[in-house]
Amino acid sequence: MKENQRLKLKLEALANQKLQKVLEVSEYNQGRTVADIPARTWADGERTKLRPDSIWADERYVDITQKEIEEAKERVKKRNLVRGVKTSSGVHVEPYNRHYEAPSAHIPLYP
């Protein structure tokens, strides 16, 4: 019973240490408040002000121009044409062809 109590206290101390570490304010945010964040409006989230061609949230590819993006799209389009990949701009997708999933031999339902 004494060991059980000791284990409980040890686990509680570890949980408290983890909580303190998680709640610690990072160096970047030291001395900052919510008032330091610039005010944004709904218009700031519109497509014209965002970078929809980028999948990275950081500044990793900030020096890429729109011309390079368009050239890359053309290269992908040509590659898909050579490979025979069908692109669909419609909403509906062609159903999966299950022809090859049929059993190779006819199996009777009732033997």
Image: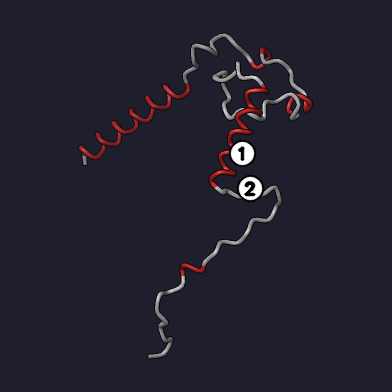
Q: Quadrant of residue 45?
A: top right
- Please tell me whether residue 109 is drawn above or below residue 29 in the rendered image: below
Quadrant occupied by the C terminus: bottom left
- Name the residue located 63 percent from the left edge and 59 percent from the top edge: 94
- Name the residue located 54 percent from the left edge and 19 percent from the top edge: 60
Circle 1: residue type: Lys
- Name the residue located 63 percent from the left edge and 23 percent from the top edge: 68
Proximity of marks 1 and 2: CB atoms separated by less than 8 Å: yes
1 or 2: tag closer to the N-terminus: 1
The local secondary structure at tag 2 comes to loop
- Name the residue located 28 percent from the left edge and 31 percent from the top edge: 10
- Please tell me whether residue 33 is drawn above or below residue 83 in the rendered image: above
Name the residue beneath numbered marker 2: 87
**Badge 1 density bin: few <14, some 14–19, many ≥20, Cα 10 Å:** some
How many numbered circles are shown? 2
Q: Nearer the viewer, mark 1 or mark 2?
A: 1
- Report the residue that reaches farthest toward the top: 31
Left or right: residue 59 versus residue 47 is left
Residue 95 lies, in percent from the top left, at 60, 61
The local secondary structure at tag 1 comes to helix
The residue nearer to you, when weighing 104 against 31, is 104
Name the residue beneath numbered marker 1: 77
- Report the residue that reaches farthest toward the front: 82
Residue 57 lies, in percent from the top left, at 58, 25
The residue nearer to you, when weighing 71 against 109, is 71
User: Label 1 vs label 2: CA separation?
Assistant: 9 Å
- Report the residue that reaches farthest toward the bottom: 111
Circle 2: residue type: Thr
**Badge 2 density bin: few <14, some 14–19, many ≥20, Cα 10 Å:** few
